[in-house]
Image: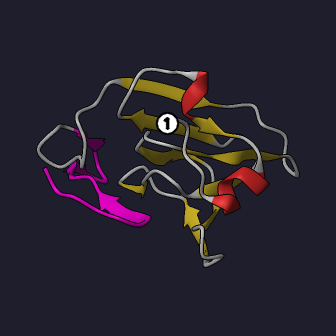
Amino acid sequence: MPSYFCPTWITFPAIGDPSIGFISIAQNTILPFALARVFWTYHTPPGITRGRHAHYKLEQILIAITGEIKIQTENRKGEKELFILNSPERGLYLPPHYWHTMEYSTHALQLTLASADYTEADYIRSYEVFKNGSDPE
């Protein structure tokens, strides 16, 4: 498995051609973590900002299955980067400790591949706690 320490593009193989369509595959040989959970976000109205959190341990890959998703990331040093997801062949890897927000185009569908089952204790929902850098015991 590859290993990354900052937000990174992940390209998924696209099998097929324009005359018949494509299939892309996410398997553990190209993912930087063992897949534990999959969820999707949809029907988010334009102009709504989602996310506004970071994680202590969770790793994720965000994929725009349809539409466009703007993702703003920030590390604890305050370094920000804007990513635009608009292809199901490419995802954005988000490591732990990166604050992120997402804005969606009309009819955008986001698929998320996650390294662990859901646990509320892994979420950093306070920006001040995130910037402070304190981890739970």
The secondary element bearing badge 1 is classed as: strand
Q: Relative to 133, is 21 on the left or the right? A: left
Which quadrant of the view contains residue 82? bottom right
Q: Position of residue 104 (x, y in %)?
A: 72, 50
At x 54%, y 45%, the residue is 135
Q: Is residue 17 above or below residue 20?
A: below
At x 21%, y 52%, the residue is 13
Color style of the picture: secondary structure
Q: Position of residue 47 (x, y in %)?
A: 88, 52
Check the image and name the residue furthest to the right. Answer: 47
Q: Which residue is more in the foreground, 63 or 124?
A: 124
Q: Is residue 41 magenta?
A: no
The kind of residue tagged 1 is Leu
Q: Is residue 109 visible?
A: yes
User: Over which residues does the magenta segment extend?
Assistant: 1-26
At x 54%, y 32%, the residue is 122
Q: Is residue 93 above or below residue 110?
A: below
Check the image and name the residue furthest to the front. Answer: 137
Q: Which residue is more in the foreground, 25 or 116?
A: 116
Q: Position of residue 137 (x, y in %)?
A: 51, 34
Q: Is residue 104 visible?
A: no
Q: Is residue 10 magenta?
A: yes
**Mark 1, residues whose alpha carbon is within 10 Å: few (<14), some, or many (≥20)?**
some
Q: Position of residue 31 (x, y in %)?
A: 23, 46
Which quadrant of the view contains residue 127? bottom right
**Residue underneath mark 1:** 111
